[in-house]
Image (cartoon, rainbow, N blue to C red):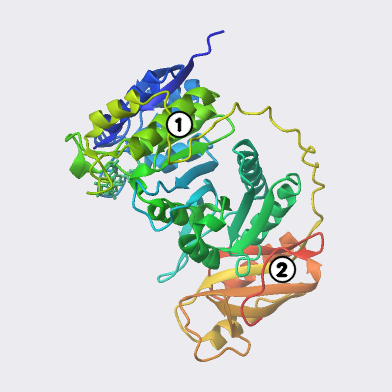
Amino acid sequence: MSNVSRITVAYGDGIGPEIMAAALHIIQSAGARIEPEVIEIGEKVYLKGNSAGIEPSAWESLRRTKVFYKAPITTPQGGGFKSLNVTARKMLGLYANVRPCVSYHPFVKTKHPNMNIVIVRENEEDCYAGMEYQLSDTVMECLKIITRPGSERIARYAFEYALQHNRKKVTCFTKDNIMKMTDGMFHKIFDEIGADYPSIEKEHWIVDIGAAKMADTPEAFDVILMPNLYGDILSDVAAQIAGSVGLAGSANVGSQCAMFEAIHGSAPRRAGQNLANPSGLLLGGVLMLVHLNQPDIAERVHNAWLCTMEDGVHTYDVFKEGTSKQKVGTKEFGEAVVARLGKTPHTLKAVHYSAAPPKAAHAAEAGRTPAKVTVEGIDVYVAWPSLDTGKLATAVQKAVGDGLDLIMIDNRGVKVWPDGMAETLCTDAYRCRFQAKNGTTSKQTVALLGRVLDQGVEIVKTETLRNFDGQAGYTLSQGQ
Ligand code: NAD
């Protein structure tokens, strides 16, 4: 069997073709055992009328090779064009986003000379599920979805990554003091999975103070695991404070496929001038070589690149009079790295990659016994243009029955009936909570909806109030 790996390559838009040519030249000169299949994605495909920016034939190549090396693309301005990155992540099930953020002091200016962290971001869930609704004339809603299986696999990925890359600590950032159910479960699962990795230090920070600490003292962290939204924001912060977003690569990894790229965009103003820095894409390529189980080549490329950086051979974005020695273009930078293949850096720390260890055996995910579920009531969201909460309460109270009582009405999560405060800002979307002391049935809650409608109240959505093994599967509203 050949040990050459087929990969799918997209040259992208703007500076994409130049930096991809340079990165592939370096990787192939280093002896990478790869066979690229080139696909077209991005601007040209969008402008041909394909709103996803990718043709069906390109998906076939991706399904076949399962490895995507992608240069940045330009998403055309205007509505109707879907983000190709988000589509690729979701379609290929790329649940883990991995972004090493390292400073290259004293060769690249940075406030954090000892920074060397890796952000592992959950890539599919959270507010990125794309589930948004307009509830009323003035209220929009975005659902934040966090699942047990999704959280389990990203937590396990972070710990496995730490083991394989000889990292000592995994830190989890969440906001579970506020989002007790969604972020609370993410944190709890981090603790559960972490128990399988006794050799790795574990800690949890609330994301706000954790982010502040990361921006101030990044050397306090090693691997940081985050749900999607915090990870999206903070991985850009981390790359920027390490020195430059132009130097970071990233991996998007799923159980079947993986995609490797630079974190920056297509920089259209720099396109076609042999100016752009290919480093971010090249370091994405290093992550790809590790994934392809070619650690020897990954190490050769990465160390040659480190030598180039410390020899002061820099593209315009990194070049600094005094520190840098030679300002070069994209092609010349590529040649400079090729000329250093086989060398190891003197000042910067040389990297070492080892073959992926066989997958560690974990205690089989204990077959979870499904929780015992009971129905307690229903939250009925209504559009109510008048600010007269009392009138709304009078109307919906006429709908009670079958043991279901009106417990409270809230607005933006703050109780406004009974005993609301005049100061509470109210919008035209309210939530009416009906609960039965001794439990109820879904049939009875549905019957209640009919009675609410009979009062001329417009229902916009409902959430069933359920208990899971005796634990409330919902939160109380502020003031309830
Ligand atoms: P950008 O990352 O392209 O550029 C930001 C700034 O950094 C610019 O000043 C640019 O000149 C500079 N820069 C970026 N990469 C560089 C490199 N390799 N070498 C030297 N300088 C570099 O961000 P933008 O201008 O906001 O976006 C441009 C386009 O890229 C948009 O169409 C956007 O949608 C797209 N984009 C694509 C991806 C992707 O494909 N993964 C990611 C982000 C943005």
Total labels: the figure holds 2
**Place of residue 99 in the rendered image (x, y in percent of width and height, measured from the top left):** 48, 44
Q: Quadrant of the N terminus?
A: top right
- Does 114 sit left or right of 79 as displayed? right
Residue corresponding to mark 2: 377
* Residue at the spot 73% in from the left edge and 45% down from the top edge: 199
Q: Report crowding for label 2: few under 14, some 14 to 19, many 20 or more residues within 10 A (C-alpha).
A: many
Q: Which residue is mark 1?
A: 286
Q: Residue at x 46, y 16 (%)?
A: 33
- Outermost residue on the left side: it is 273
Mark 2 vs mark 1: which is more N-terminal? 1
Amino acid of disc 1 = Val
Q: Is residue 276 above or below residue 424?
A: above
Which tag is nearer the camera, tag 2 or tag 1? 1
Q: Is residue 171 above or below residue 13?
A: below
Where on the picture, by quarter, is residue 373?
A: bottom right
